């Protein structure tokens, strides 16, 4: 979406130049279309150059975007966003302990719905169940969104599934067959490409905020992770065979996330459940679920209306409801977990 010039003239110029591709856009065309003076166009082009955009100028022909920096800045995202709330506020950091921790602080000090913390690297990225999320610098997407849904706390876990659907959807849009493994691992085949971690703050009746943390492996190669992680991980680059534009992916993810959040708000969990089931690999498989001090083996038959996994142990008549745990999907000859 082309941003309003008055709100963000640099983004509007970038959008215009990107649309012109290899063609030069004349100063008149830019100033006419965007309602800026030619002097303003020049001033903003200079500002863009200072931020790493290479913009060629040829007298009598105009401006051409030659290259752009590999960044996830608010500017780089803004002209690709089609959202009303998601990523309309961006805190973009070179390094942070954990984007989730930062987003929780921001939420507590009043961040609006949709605000997002993005970092190039995390020194202590958090995974599920106390694990670490390896966050090599400048290669992937590490972000945490502040959400303020109008939901009772018992329904907050649904948002993790909304997030998983959005991530898998965005990855499919980028050209790979991403699938979801309950509750929130996004995989390609048996290799994990993305993970989600939600943190909730609630009163008795209503959610105050949810922080939805998302890590997606985009341009990392096997040597960017520890051997333990790279044995089970993959990235978009590894799957496609070429590097990807991280800003294009991040903006697409935020666009898809808002679509699925809106649907969730309007129609409830049913539509999300259908999309989740369509993309999930867990259902119909034999699973071993590891919970706090307990294990459960059986067939994963469905999810319920809250997103809990329903597991039917051999010989049992009724499925057991699993709210949290690690799931190993059993294969005929071997068991394997994608958890890391
Ligand atoms: C998992 O274990 O699968 C969940 C991983 C979640 C990782 C992301 S990266 C961005 C955000 N910040 C964190 O510290 N964790 C999440």
Image: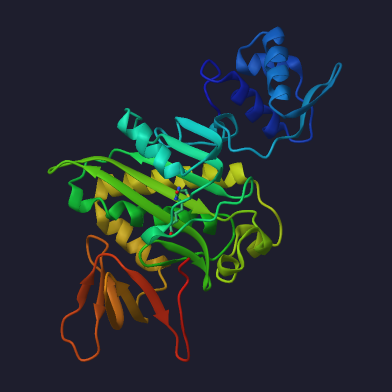
In-image side of 172 versus 294 (left or right): right
Which corner quadrant of the image does residue 182 belong to?
A: bottom left
Furthest toward the left, the residue is 204
Can you give x and y, in whole percent of width and height, for residue 94 in the image? 58, 36
Q: Residue at x 41, y 57 (%)?
A: 164
* Residue 107 in sight here: yes
Of 200 and 24, which appears nearest the observer?
200
In-image side of 239 versus 297 (left or right): right
Q: Look at the picture and state if 19 lies above or below 165.
A: above
Q: Residue at x 32, y 74 (%)?
A: 290
Q: Look at the picture and state if 269 lies above or below 65.
A: below
* Residue 1 in sight here: no
Can you give x and y, in whole percent of width and height, for residue 172 in the image? 53, 59
Of 309 and 271, which appears nearest the observer?
309
Q: Residue at x 62, y 22 (%)?
A: 10
Which corner quadrant of the image does residue 51 belong to?
A: top right
Can you give x and y, in whole percent of width and height, for residue 25 in the image? 75, 24
Can you give x and y, in whole percent of width and height, for residue 142 in the image? 51, 47
In-image side of 257 versus 94 (left or right): left
Of 38 and 114, which appears nearest the observer?
114
In-image side of 97 versus 161 (left or right): right
Q: Residue at x 22, y 62 (%)?
A: 305
Render colour scheme: rainbow
Of 261 and 214, which appears nearest the observer?
214
Query: What number of labels is visible?
Result: 0
């Amino acid at each position: 979406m082309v941003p309003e010039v008055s709100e963000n003239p640099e983004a509007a110029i970038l959008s215009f130049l990107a649309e012109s591709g290899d063609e030069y856009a004349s100063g008149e065309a830019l100033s006419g279309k965007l309602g800026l003076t030619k002097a303003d166009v020049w001033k903003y082009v200079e500002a863009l150059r200072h931020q790493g955009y290479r913009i060629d100028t040829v007298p009598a022909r105009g401006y051409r975007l030659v290259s752009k920096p590999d960044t996830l800045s608010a500017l780089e995202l803004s002209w690709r966003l089609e959202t009303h709330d998601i990523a309309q506020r961006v805190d973009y950091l070179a390094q942070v302990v954990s984007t989730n921790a930062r987003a929780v602080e921001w939420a507590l000090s009043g961040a609006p719905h949709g605000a997002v913390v993005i970092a190039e690297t995390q020194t202590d990225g958090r995974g599920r169940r106390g694990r670490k999320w390896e966050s090599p610098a400048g290669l992937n997407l590490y972000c945490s969104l502040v959400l303020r849904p109008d939901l009772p706390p018992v329904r907050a876990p649904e948002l993790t599934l909304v997030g998983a659907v959005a991530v898998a959807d965005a990855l499919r849009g980028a050209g790979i067959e991403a699938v979801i493994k309950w509750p929130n691992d996004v995989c390609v085949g048996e290799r994990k490409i993305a993970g989600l971690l939600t943190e909730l703050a609630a009163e008795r009746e209503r959610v105050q905020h949810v922080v939805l943390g998302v890590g997606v492996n985009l341009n990392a190669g096997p040597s960017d992770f520890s051997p333990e992680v790279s044995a089970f991980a993959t990235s978009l680059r590894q799957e496609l065979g070429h590097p990807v534009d991280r800003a294009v992916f991040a903006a697409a993810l935020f666009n898809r996330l808002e679509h699925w959040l809106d649907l969730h708000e309007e129609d409830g969990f049913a539509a999300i459940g259908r999309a989740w089931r369509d993309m999930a690999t867990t259902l119909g498989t034999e699973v071993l679920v590891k919970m706090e001090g307990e294990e459960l083996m059986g067939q994963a038959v469905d999810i319920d209306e809250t997103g809990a996994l329903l597991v039917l142990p051999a010989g049992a008549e009724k499925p057991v409801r699993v709210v949290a745990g690690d799931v190993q999907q059993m294969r005929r000859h071997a068991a394997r977990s994608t958890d890391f």
